[in-house]
Image (spheres, helix red, strand yellow):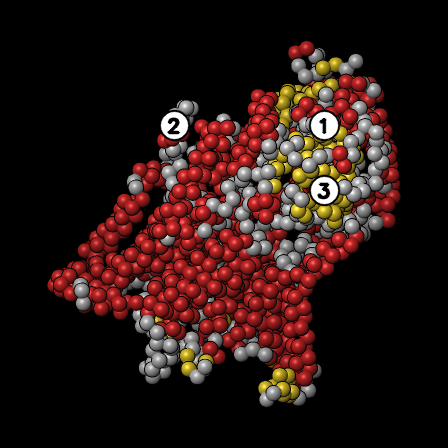
């Protein structure tokens, strides 16, 4: 059965230096408002990890904290052996993490190709081979390469946002609800694409409202409730756990 | 009540026809932003004096429904009826004057005003809201008499929510939980018939949560107020609301009491994100 | 439900339409009147002249050219105002005085360069007091040098002001920044007055008049304004579309948060915004003086409202809109003379600004608010 | 503790009336000292001149700052068209009161009594203000700023237009005088007649020490203007310390919340614009038209920004702060530097331009530069004003008194006695 991971003293967490990403005792929030308290999380190399939980549990806040977009209040975030807890996003991107926000994740007035170029801004040269890779992964983007991103459909924008994040060939990709706002028939396709990104060696930390589908596909999952760890286990275990189901609905 | 959202009703759900004395009726409410349909034919009713819960996964359209009812957004279609009168698309101040008020998801205190000022702002049609009356010597006496009454009521309300010790503090200096209490106090000062609470417990610690819920129950009991509550914390909804409305993809998926909702497989599916 | 939605739409349309209908009616009348005027006919109704009069094609063309020239310079200066609005999110009331500062720096350089070796005392040259009138043809190198100094100098001024004033308050709200810019405007304008005095100096006059198609004529200085501003606008276009930093500027104007998580160095983009906007403002000011011939410490301040009008008409935040809006406002300012007495043409340009802000706050060139 | 903080703490300790009186007294004292040090035998006349002028300035800016404080400080309406509303008031008064049989070359008016003219001016400014408020209902603050400043320029350019300089209406000839302006019965004459009539014994005493009649009239006018400030303050204090003022503050903080608490915020915004603009219109004629003459060049947008500077220095949101800000701005930043500059003897070595002044530095002679700087201090004071504005916005955005907590209510807000029974208070 799922283990309680809320009390760190009782759980032996892996040594941070052995993990790609290790979050320990993280407290974070926005301004004065604390959202996360004492959060623990790990992502191993090439692992696919999903964070689920009820609305307002602080799932997105975890990802934003990793990427330096929240107010840091304590604890640590270690990536690839480096403490990045108090770094800014423009420094973190050099470490090999890319982030796809849930909304506003493309530059609407730039063309598709320009969006991809912006994804590799920190490189000296536009990496044509990476653009080619992204086009191969998402062929529709090649077709639309000269079109303004704002004119793409929701699903295409989501692909572009992922493509932009993949331009730096990151070790870890942070995805915030990639299926949000997609028509039901596109959701499956989006999850397939994420699987393939993971298969090609990129570790993924993803927040997903569509818990069932996400837990089915991931390696491991975390259940976050009210800004704290509630459960963690293999995706399939969590999926079939009656207690987890109850916690989503209370009672 | 007319037809509802195309979703088939389950045996466990209670048809809104069964709501006795509906105070608020929402019929086929629809709101579209550009190409996105946020609310798609939501139909439900809130019984007078009830504490009704409105739940649903992210993006189900709860907040938009709230905004359409309270006049922040103009609905694209559908009807909203309050106390027997159609109120669709009326501006927020008209609704508030008729007794329908709301709180906000993120407490919106008037931060550079004191807690007392925040609370004293709320009552309707204060004599001193007239510029002339507040200035002219003869007329100002009425203003002062009215102000004294408002002030005394404000203190009572602050006492009720136990934030009287903060009365002269700027609202911006309050903690998150205190802001929630202030917002409730402010709304009560408008002398409402019905209050729409948008996540009143988000970011509130358990002790305070208890206190707030106690106050809500007390207000129902003693003043007969009606509450519609959007809340993420399922325990709160299940333990406090006698009637629960579940929204999913812009329309009402199920209705009923806590037991009916928890045993409704489709609600679970909606939350876990499966096909519905 | 559909019916209700339609009813709502048409209600909204009725509310919106009167303004648009009125504007269309006025424009239609003006165009018709213009045609009638050009054909030399007058139409009377109840004893009042309601249409027509007389207007020579040649004078219409010269008005168009006047408007175009002023409009190009205003548009050039407006680019910076528009960019600071979209990237730094505030209305910069000191922009007009940047125009003045650039113009003074440029003209002092041009004047000294042109005066060296003529025996004129350096003090008089510096104060733009020797009474010499420069023109592109007669003093090409000094005029060109002045142009470069105007651009470079105003970049320097802008960066200094940013460093001292706006950078310490990046987190402040847009109204605080606006108020700070009012302080900057005052300080800059009167520093210029302190150094150069408050008189108006005549510094340029066309050296050569070139006639096109037999009817239209322009001086060499006016041609310079036309050519330089068109070239610079083309350069801005290429910078934004072709260079990495230019694309980053557009990206940041579009979505600042996303730009930050994408790794775009926002502080550098802000600096580039100031450099580009300040430089173009200075050059715009320099060229306007080249065309009008006179310079004084507050000409940019007086021009500021016209620049705002250009930027708003073009859609605030849009760089191409600023260019087009500049030309349009320049034309309004000049062509209004056909219908209005000369004292009211400027008022007409401001009225256009007010009407656009009320009826179509996103500008008349569509809702695109970014570069 | 910074200097600003210690100044603030001392200010906080004083009651408002004492605060204002102390401020005014200090500024008068500075003027007196200046007059004593440069005036020689003429010191008394000079002092009366200085004090009279500075009082008129302070009075004018105080009325304007109070009006702006209602619109911006309280309600958050970013009106930078003050000059235009002043012009509406001043021109209406002028046209109403200008004599029907003017001197040669001047424009005729309706010849009505001054008080009718003043009321008419306020009314006209209020109506135009109400019209200008309509965009305020839907525009963002910075757009509203641009609309109002453009609007004020349209007004100025219109009264400047020669076509309105003189025209016939219902058989009467009247007009704005165009660019040359318009003359009318001046409020200053009222001060003059006061001095010569009721105040004759006092006037004689002043004239005994050498104060000239115009300077005395000016001083009297300044004091009359201060009485108008007092009356405006009284009205505005009551207006803002009331449920009306509470709604205004709430609009500034969050208009959506205010609406959802049952307030029709549009009505409040329009009223605020009308009341504030009426007062701006009054200031237009009393301040700019002191001498019974106005022209379009007196209503350039720059004056709007001076009023903003005054309010920001004093602390937006505070009525008392508005007056202190007006006093600080117009007394210490605007008036004093110019008078000092004028009265420092520069000798014959003062250079005529900055190049000569700087060149002299080459021969290690700093005097020409100093002389040039002092000689141009009336220009440099505007640089000072700009710098002060930037400094305040960066470091002391609350100004002198904006940090004060002045609850908008018409009664004492402490728990009333009847309530004190059961529960413990605080």
Q: Nearer the viewer, residue D156 or C139?
A: D156
Q: Is residue D335 left or right of residue D136?
A: left
- Residue that badge 1 annotates: A54
Give me the chain letter of mark 3.
Answer: B
Residue C348 image offset from top left, x and y in percent: 56, 71
Residue A150 image offset from top left, x and y in percent: 76, 49
C208 versus A162 height, above or below: below
Find numbered disc 1 in the image and state the secondary structure of the residue it sits on. loop
Question: Which label was assigned to residue B26?
Answer: 3
> Farthest residue in the top direction?
A10
Q: Which residue is at a point 73% across and 25% down the rendered structure image?
A: B258
Q: Nearer the viewer, residue B151 or D85?
A: B151
Q: Which residue is at a point 48% across and 61% down the rendered structure image?
A: D129
Which corner quadrant holds the C terminus of chain B? Answer: top right
**Mark nearer the viewer, 1 or 3:** 3
Q: Which residue is at a point 85% across and 33% down the rendered structure image?
A: B275
The answer to whether any part of residue A223 appears in the image is no
Residue C182 image offset from top left, x and y in percent: 47, 54
Question: Which label was assigned to residue D420?
Answer: 2
Q: CA distance from mark 2 to mark 3?
A: 45 Å
């Amino acid at each position: 059965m799922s283990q309680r991971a809320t009390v760190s003293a009782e759980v032996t967490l892996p040594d941070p230096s052995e993990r790609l990403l290790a979050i320990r005792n993280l407290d974070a929030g926005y301004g004065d408002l604390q959202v996360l308290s004492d959060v623990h999380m790990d992502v191993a190399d090439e692992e696919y990890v999903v964070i689920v939980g009820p609305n307002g549990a602080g799932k997105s806040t975890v990802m934003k904290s990793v990427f330096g977009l929240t107010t840091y209040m304590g604890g640590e975030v270690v990536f690839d052996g480096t403490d990045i807890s108090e770094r800014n996003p423009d420094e973190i991107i050099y470490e090999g993490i890319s982030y796809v926000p849930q909304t506003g994740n493309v530059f609407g007035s730039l063309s598709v190709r320009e969006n991809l170029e912006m994804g590799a801004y920190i490189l000296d040269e536009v990496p044509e081979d990476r653009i080619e890779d992204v086009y191969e992964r998402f062929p529709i983007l090649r077709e639309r390469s000269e079109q303004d991103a704002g004119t793409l459909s929701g699903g295409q924008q989501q692909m572009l946002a992922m493509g932009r994040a993949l331009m730096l060939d990151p070790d870890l990709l942070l995805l915030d609800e990639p299926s949000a706002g997609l028509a039901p028939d596109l959701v499956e396709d989006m999850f397939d694409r994420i699987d393939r990104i993971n298969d090609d060696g990129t570790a993924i930390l993803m927040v997903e409202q569509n818990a069932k589908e996400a837990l089915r596909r991931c390696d491991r999952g975390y259940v976050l409730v009210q800004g704290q760890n509630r459960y963690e286990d293999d995706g399939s275990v969590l999926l079939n756990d009656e207690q987890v189901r109850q916690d989503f609905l209370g009672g | 009540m007319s037809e509802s959202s195309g979703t088939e009703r389950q045996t466990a759900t209670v048809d809104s026809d069964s709501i006795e004395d509906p105070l608020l009726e929402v019929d086929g409410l629809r709101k579209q932003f550009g190409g996105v349909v946020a609310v798609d034919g939501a139909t439900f009713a809130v019984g007078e004096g009830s504490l009704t819960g409105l739940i649903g996964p992210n993006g189900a359209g709860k907040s938009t429904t709230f905004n359409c009812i309270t006049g922040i957004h103009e609905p694209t279609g559908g009807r909203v009826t309050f106390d027997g009168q159609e109120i669709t698309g009326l501006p927020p101040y008209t609704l508030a004057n008729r007794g329908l008020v709301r709180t906000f998801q993120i407490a919106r205190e008037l931060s550079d005003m004191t807690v007392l000022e925040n609370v004293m702002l709320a009552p309707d049609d204060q004599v001193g809201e007239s510029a002339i009356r507040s200035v002219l010597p003869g007329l100002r006496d009425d203003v002062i008499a009215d102000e004294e009454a408002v002030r005394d009521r404000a203190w009572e309300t602050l006492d009720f929510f136990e934030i009287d010790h903060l009365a002269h503090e700027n609202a911006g200096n309050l903690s998150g939980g205190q802001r929630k209490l202030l917002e409730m106090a402010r709304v009560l000062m408008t002398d409402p018939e019905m209050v729409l609470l948008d996540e009143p417990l988000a970011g509130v610690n358990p002790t305070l949560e208890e206190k707030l819920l106690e106050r809500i129950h007390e207000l129902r009991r003693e003043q007969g107020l009606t509450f519609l509550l959007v809340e993420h914390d399922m325990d709160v909804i299940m333990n406090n609301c006698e009637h629960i409305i579940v929204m999913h993809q812009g329309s009402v998926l199920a209705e009923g009491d806590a037991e009916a909702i928890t045993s409704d497989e489709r609600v679970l599916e909606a939350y876990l994100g499966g096909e519905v | 439900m559909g019916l209700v939605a339609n009813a709502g739409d048409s209600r909204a349309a009725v509310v919106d339409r009167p303004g648009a209908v009125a504007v269309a009616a006025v424009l239609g009348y003006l165009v018709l009147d213009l045609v009638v005027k050009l054909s030399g006919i007058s139409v009377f109704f109840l004893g009042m002249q309601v249409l027509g009069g007389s207007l020579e094609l040649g004078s219409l063309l010269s008005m168009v050219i006047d408007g175009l020239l002023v409009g190009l310079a205003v548009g050039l200066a407006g680019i910076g105002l528009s960019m600071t609005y979209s990237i730094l999110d505030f209305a910069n009331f000191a922009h007009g005085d940047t125009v003045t500062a650039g113009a003074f720096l440029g003209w002092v350089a041009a004047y000294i360069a042109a005066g060296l070796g003529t025996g004129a005392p350096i003090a008089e040259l510096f104060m733009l007091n020797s009474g010499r009138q420069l023109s592109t043809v007669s003093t090409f190198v000094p005029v060109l040098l002045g142009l470069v100094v105007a651009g470079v100098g105003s970049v320097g001024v802008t960066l200094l002001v940013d460093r001292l004033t706006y950078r310490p308050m990046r987190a402040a709200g847009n109204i605080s920044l606006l108020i700070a810019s009012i302080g900057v405007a005052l300080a800059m304008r009167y520093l210029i007055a302190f150094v150069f005095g408050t008189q108006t100096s005549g510094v340029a006059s066309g050296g050569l008049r070139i006639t096109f198609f037999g009817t239209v004529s322009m001086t060499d200085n006016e041609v310079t304004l036309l050519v330089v501003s068109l070239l610079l606008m083309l350069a801005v276009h290429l910078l934004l579309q072709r260079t990495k930093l230019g694309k980053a500027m557009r990206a940041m104007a579009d979505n600042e948060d996303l730009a930050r998580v994408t790794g775009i160095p926002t502080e550098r983009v802000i600096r580039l915004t100031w450099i580009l906007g300040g430089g173009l403002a200075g050059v715009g000011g320099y060229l306007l003086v080249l065309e009008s011939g006179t310079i004084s410490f507050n000409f940019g301040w007086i021009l500021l409202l016209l620049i705002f009008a250009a930027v708003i008409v073009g859609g605030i935040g849009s760089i191409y809109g600023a260019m087009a809006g500049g030309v349009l406002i320049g034309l309004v300012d000049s062509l209004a003379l056909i219908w209005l007495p000369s004292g009211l043409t400027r008022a007409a340009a401001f009225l256009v600004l007010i009407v656009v802000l009320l009826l179509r706050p996103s500008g008349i060139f569509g809702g695109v608010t970014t570069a | 503790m910074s200097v600003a903080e210690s100044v603030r703490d001392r200010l906080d300790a004083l009651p408002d009336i004492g605060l204002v009186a102390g401020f005014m007294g200090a500024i008068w004292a500075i003027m007196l000292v200046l007059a004593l040090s440069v005036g020689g035998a003429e010191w008394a006349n000079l002092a009366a001149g200085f004090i009279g002028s500075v009082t008129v300035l302070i009075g004018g800016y105080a009325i304007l700052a109070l009006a702006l404080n209602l619109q911006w400080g309280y309600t958050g309406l970013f009106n930078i068209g003050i000059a235009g509303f002043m012009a509406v008031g001043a021109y209406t008064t002028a046209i109403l009161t200008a004599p029907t049989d003017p001197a040669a070359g001047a424009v005729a008016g309706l010849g009505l009594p001054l008080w009718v003219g003043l009321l008419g001016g306020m009314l006209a400014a209020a109506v135009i203000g109400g019209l200008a408020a309509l965009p305020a209902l839907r525009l963002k603050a910075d757009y509203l700023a641009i609309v109002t400043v453009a609007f004020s320029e349209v007004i100025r350019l219109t009264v400047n237009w020669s076509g309105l300089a003189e025209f016939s209406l219902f058989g009467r000839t009247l007009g704005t005088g165009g660019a040359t302006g318009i003359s009318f019965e001046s409020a200053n004459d009222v001060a003059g007649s006061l001095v010569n009539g009721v105040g004759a014994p006092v006037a004689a005493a002043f004239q005994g020490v050498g104060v000239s009649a115009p300077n005395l009239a000016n001083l009297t006018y300044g004091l009359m203007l201060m009485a108008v400030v007092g009356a405006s303050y009284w009205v505005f204090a009551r207006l803002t310390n009331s449920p009306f003022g509470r709604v205004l503050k709430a609009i500034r903080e969050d208009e959506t919340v205010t609406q959802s608490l049952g307030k029709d915020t549009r009505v409040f915004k329009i009223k605020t614009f009308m009341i504030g603009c009426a007062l701006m219109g009054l200031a237009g004629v009393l301040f700019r038209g002191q001498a019974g003459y106005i022209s379009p060049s007196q209503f350039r947008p720059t004056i709007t920004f001076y009023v903003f500077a005054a309010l920001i220095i004093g602390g937006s949101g505070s009525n008392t702060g508005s007056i202190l800000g007006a006093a600080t701005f117009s007394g210490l930043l605007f008036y004093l530097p110019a008078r000092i500059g004028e009265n420092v003897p520069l000798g014959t070595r003062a250079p005529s331009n900055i190049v000569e002044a700087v060149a002299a530095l080459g021969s290690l002679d700093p005097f020409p530069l100093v002389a040039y700087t002092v000689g141009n201090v009336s220009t440099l004071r505007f640089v000072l004003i700009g710098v002060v504005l930037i400094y305040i916005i960066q470091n002391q955005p609350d100004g002198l008194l904006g940090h004060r907590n002045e609850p908008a209510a018409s009664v004492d807000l402490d728990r009333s006695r009847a309530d004190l029974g059961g529960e413990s208070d605080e």
